[in-house]
Amino acid sequence: MRLIDWPMRGLQRLLGERRMAYVFLLPNLVFFSLFVFLPLIINVVFSVTGGAALFPSERPYVGGGQYAYLFDCDSFLDPGSCREDHFWRGVANTLRFTTFQVVAMVLFSLVTAVVLNMRIRGRGFFRAVYFFPVLLSPVVVALIWKWILQRDGLLNAGLTALGGQKILFFIDPGWAMFWAVFVSIWAHMGFYTLILLAGLQAIPADLYEAAEMDATPRWRAFWRITLPLLWPNLVVVIVLALIRGVQTFDEVFVLTGGGPGTATLMVVQYIYETAFSNQVQNFGLAAAASVVLGIVLFGLTLAQLAASRRRSA
Amino acid sequence: MTMRAWVSALAVVTGLLAVDVAQAQTTVRMSWYSDGNEGEVVADLLKRFEAQNKDIKIVLDQVPYKAINENLPVQLASGQGPDIARVVDLGGIARYALDLRPYLKDAAYWDANFGPFLEWMRPQGDTNSIPGFMTQLTVTGPFVNKTLFEQAGIALPGAKATWEDWAKATKDVAAKVQAPFPIAMDRSGHRFFGLAISEGAKLFDAKGEPAVIDDGFKRAAQLVYDWHKSGVMAKELWGSVSGAAYRGANDEFKNAQVVMYMSGSWQIAQFDKTVGNAFDWVAVPTPCGPAGCTAMPGGAGLVAIKTTKNPAAVARVMEYLASEPVLSEFYSRSLFVPGHIGIAAKGLDYKDASPLAKASLKVFSDQVAGLSPVAYKLQGYANNRIIFNAVISRVGQAISGETTLDEAYKRVASDVEQQIAERNKK
């Protein structure tokens, strides 16, 4: 520490105490500019250019052409009526996935957090069990569940052992979406449970004691004390789960490959495939789609910030 | 001088010499994917090259097939990438390929032995460059689980049997032996087009521009669609994933769940090793349609990359690998159909192959003579993967019940048109 003591003191004398704060912010700002803001700008540039070249200087300017192509639909409610139907199928699937996933995730996380907050035997063990999947890579999670769910997987082995028929989970659109949501909840629920558990533990115990003295039923105490005081945590959980839902890619991609057909194709997979999988790597169209996705995520992030601010106010 | 001083001096001199040798060494980087054991074989051959050529060090990056198709083009577009790469999308990579002709000792050897395949690797309009050579010539075609036919007591259809004959026979076998996959076809446009061309698909108009949807194409798509409806094909390959994702049935075939597996010659080494004596498998001639019985040619080429800083060293490595004795050994050990006219003409002794593998290699080699010119034209077309990808994506959607075949036809045509227009945008 002594080594940097004298240059710091010198800088502080030179700049004054208030400006020193910016000196500490500068390295991170440079890092963010290089690896976050610069790629963002490049992405926006790509979204207004066309062709198959990679260097912006070699790409012809097409203005809003990529966006016009993306939004060329007879009806936004029918992806099949759009010129770029895969994008809109991805949008519809992402919305469906996010809605189911957020509702179910919040509900399960809340119930689990409430139970884990009770004085039950093996509480520490159960907390670890629910948190463990969060530590796994999404690809590992998807592979584990693929082994369980495939034609000759564990679940079908169990079903046939019980005299049932094999179910081909990945070729039925309904089942494929169900398992995509289920696996995502299984993998991430522990994280949200932890946030809610922290919120539950911050609720003063004397409120419950007072309610108990008033002979308030448990469900009423939950409704009148727990939920209102947990609400800020719940809002954070909902917004974080929403952002994660919209960004979903790796788990579902490995689990279902976006199929059957395009039943579980998510927007991020569409962007990835448009940019990298097709023979003509259509960076312009992929960039335009990611700008649209970015705007949605930006809106959700603002919502999260507003919610956090309200919580701390 | 003491003994210790002598030893120190010797060590210094040795060290300096080593540094000198190391400094004189040129590093050549090669990206390589494998279907079977060819990665081991080429690594062995390259070790021999390095032993004879101390001034060249070869770094062999063994990468997955997906990385070659998806990451390598982006690397190359950004001016990065290896000096040599083993690629499948020959047309797509053509603009990044180095013309080896000025660096080769004997360009005539390459023209004579790789001539027909060089066209596949050249950019459009180029009729002279030598970008690389074929590490294998592949031919699409079916493998049949003969044991399942025997267990079912059903005779294998003959050499000129139609696709419909095979569909019926395999379905009967599957029903008797409880196999879930009567016919499994790789989820790959390349595999589909053997059937489509046999059904009469012409693919190109009089000007040579793509005209994918015609009656022949529709007949083939309808067959595949109907087979999924009737249970001849299971939805797990074509109907389970989205977009241009490839899906094979290697594991299912190895586990004796597939009666007939429509794949290709590159699988022989793998099946020879993994199936072993578990059951008898045979390659059979490609089934026939009204327009013939053609397979699709293809293969992987080893291509020199334009951005290399050491073209002369790259050319030496390529010359070594493409030389007749080395390439013969490579084909023979990896059980590949030769993509070298001279070796193919002389015939190849696959010493290490089992009788089953040898018989399969013969069947595939015999198919080469019957390949349709349309199949060659499609393989040589620089934008062929645009067509392949559009077909599996859209026909896959129809198979999974998401859209109709008629809608899929329209989408295939518009996808191909839009992507080619995007590529040509300057």
Image (cartoon, rainbow, N blue to C red):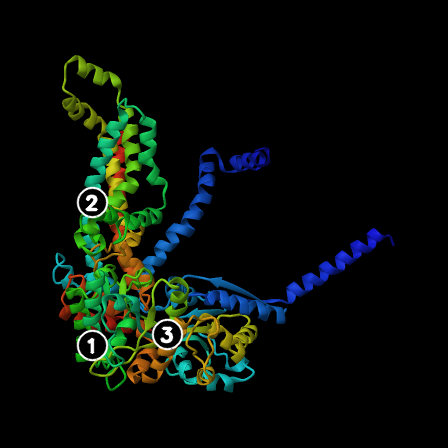
- Quadrant (top left, top right, bottom left, bottom right) of the N terminus of chain B: bottom right
Q: Nearer the viewer, mark 3 or mark 1?
A: 3
The residue that disc 2 covers is A162
Measure how far apart labels 3 and 1 are at the Cα level. Answer: 28 Å
Q: Which mark is residue B217?
A: 1
Is residue B125 shown above or below B10? below
Q: Helix or strand or loop: what does disc 2 sit on?
A: loop
Residue A10 image offset from top left, x and y in percent: 56, 36
Q: Residue B360 carries which label?
A: 3
Residue ranking furthest to the top:
A213
Which quadrant of the view contains residue B294? bottom left
Residue A258 image offset from top left, x and y in percent: 25, 56
The amino acid marked with disc number 3 is Ser
Q: Which of marks 2 and 1 is in front?
A: 2
The amino acid marked with disc number 1 is Phe
> Quick one: B155 or B228, which is closer to the camera?
B155
